[in-house]
Amino acid sequence: MIRADLHIHTKYSRDASQQPKTIVEKLNAHPTLNAIAITDHNTIQGNLEAQKLAEAYPDILVIPGVEISTEEGEIIILGITGLPPKPWNAENIIDFAKANNGLTIAPHPYRGVGIGDMARQLELDAIEVLNGITEPDLNRQAEVLARTMRLPGVAGSDAHDDKDSWNACTEVQASLDVGDILKAIRKGRVRAFSI
């Protein structure tokens, strides 16, 4: 079993300030988390840097990821090593993820640029039911969405700076391996909770 924050931003997101090095060091020192997904907005640069830094620590994992701004709203892709080709609309993003063994998540579906009820028309793999910087009633709406769509519910802090980090986590019944984690999420072997 692993515990992962599946939604963190670095300085490579225009609205974030966290350094990849700081994030990796905090993860290594964290008492319960052992994996994170760096999901910067429309770039994998922060993820690539964090993955390289994490190689020095055998007991932690940085999951490849990105948060793409589509025409319909934001979609997180985990497990990919490159950006999808444009145009960035929901259908193209999901097709790209499937073709590259990636996993798609609707982050904060009812906040800001979330995808909202449009998620019901898409072949997503999971719904973010607990977002660390989203109001509780909007997270509850996301829980209902996941339940009605029969999709796994995951969690992430959506941290953009140090004060937001590590407040939401997904427990995944998997080993510390990206492929195993993505497979477990798809099968619903997850539990979202606040830290």
Image (cartoon, helix red, strand yellow):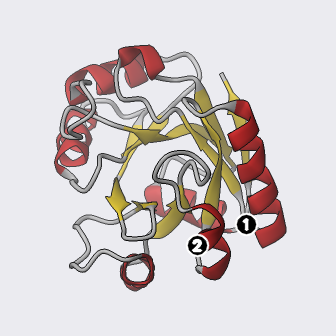
Examine the image and state in which quarter residue 94 appears. Answer: bottom left
* Residue 18 position in % (x across, y down): 26, 24
Residue wearing tag 2: 124
Residue type at the position of mark 2: Leu
Please, is residue 92 above or below residue 9 in the view?
below
- The dot on residue 115 is none
Examine the image and state in which quarter residue 52 appears. Answer: top left
* Residue 72 position in % (x across, y down): 45, 69
**Image-based side of 78 in relation to 135, left or right:** left
Looking at the image, do the residues carrying marks 1 and 2 touch, with CB atoms under 8 Å apart?
yes
Give the quarter of the figure containing the N terminus: top right
Q: Residue at x 57, y 30 (%)?
A: 132
Give the quarter of the figure containing the C terminus: top right
One can see residue 165 in this view? yes
Question: How packed is label 2: few (under 14 Cα within 10 Å), some, or many (20 or more)?
Answer: many
Of pointers 1 and 2, the one earlier in the residue sequence: 2
Q: Residue at x 20, y 32 (%)?
A: 11
Q: Residue at x 55, y 60 (%)?
A: 106
* Residue 177 position in % (x across, y down): 47, 53
